[in-house]
Image: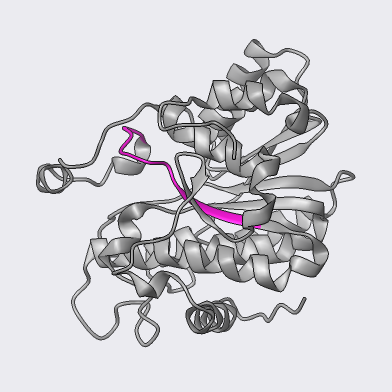
Amino acid sequence: MSNFTKDSTATEVAATLATHIAGKVILITGCSPNGLGATAAMAIAPHNPALIILAGRNRSLIEETEKTLLEKVPTLKTRTLIFDLGSLKSVRDAAAEVNNYPEKIDVLINNAAIMASPFSKTVDGFESQLGVNHLGPFLFTMLVVDKLNRGGRVINISSAGYAFGGVRFDDPNFEAGEYDKWQSYAQSKTANILFSSALAKRYRSKEILSFSLHVGGGIMTNLGKYLTPEDLAMLSFVTIITHEQGAASYIAAAFDPELEGNNGAYLEYCKPIPTLPESPWTRGEENEDKLWNLSEKMVGEKFGV
């Protein structure tokens, strides 16, 4: 196993895996400045990728990240993709745009997310954290999965927040009871884990690799914009790490050849680890299948292998 640790940075991991980055086409969602998607792109950029596709909802922020990247590596080839994960129509339009690209995709990093937000619904009527963090990425991935090269990778950014609870299969939109923002976040992050392991199994014959990951600690990014002082006090036990440390696992998941034997795994600090024994909702074929079926029902489309 690669000798990466909790102190490894995205820059260091990318330098180690430079030969595996060269020539690759990478699509990263949620590439706003000060976020981990942008940090990952910055680490990848110097190592001769064929193309980095920067995706996000806010055009001006995505273009700001693109400008910074090109200032760092003027020869870098970039492209922007603007869409809203909270809108199935927007997701479908973006997927159609990707499917019209001349290039195949080597790595898809589903990074964009919201956390502990007040109750709201997407334009399609889904609870927002489930909609943005899982249903949008699920639909986008499944619509572009045939655009992936053999050996291509799908990386779903999860969180240790899965420990707060699993997928509410009977009431995913909190229609029957009081909304809990942390239960909602946990549901979406558990879904990221189950989707990753299910995708790995269902698309093994097409040699698609899929991983979920927790960055390993807390990082001050825009993801935390909804956190209250009470939330911060509750989370005071969380180790604070840098953007570079957090994005290191993105790079390992996307490019480390030594992870090929761990398809479907959940990673932390660049290495596969089991989810907690007391969180059985994060694993098992029954949970994977239930999530897959629920997701297909909610987005209104079935996906066969």
Identify which residue is drawn at 29% across, 78% down.
174
Q: Quadrant of the N terminus?
A: top right
Q: Which image quarter: residue 280?
A: bottom left
Which quarter shows the C terminus?
Answer: bottom right
Question: In the image, what residue occupies the spot 21% across and 67% down?
Answer: 180
Decide which of 79, 195 is in the foreground and name it: 195
218 within the magenta span: yes
**Residue lying at 64% horizontally and 42% vertically, measured from the top left:** 254
Image coordinates of residue 185 in percent, x first then y, are 33, 61
Identify the image quadrant of residue 94. bottom right
The answer to whether residue 62 is left or right of residue 102 is left
Location of residue 238 with respect to 278 vertically, above or below? above
Question: Is 199 or 223 nearer to us in this picture?
Answer: 199
**Vertical comparison of 284 with 9: above or below:** below
Please state the horizontal and vertical placement of residue 82, each as a whole percent of the image. Answer: 62, 44
**Which percent across, then down, holds residue 41?**
60, 29
Q: Is residue 246 above or below residue 259?
A: above
Specify the segment rendered in magenta: 210-221
Q: Report the residue at 68% width, 81% height from top.
A: 302
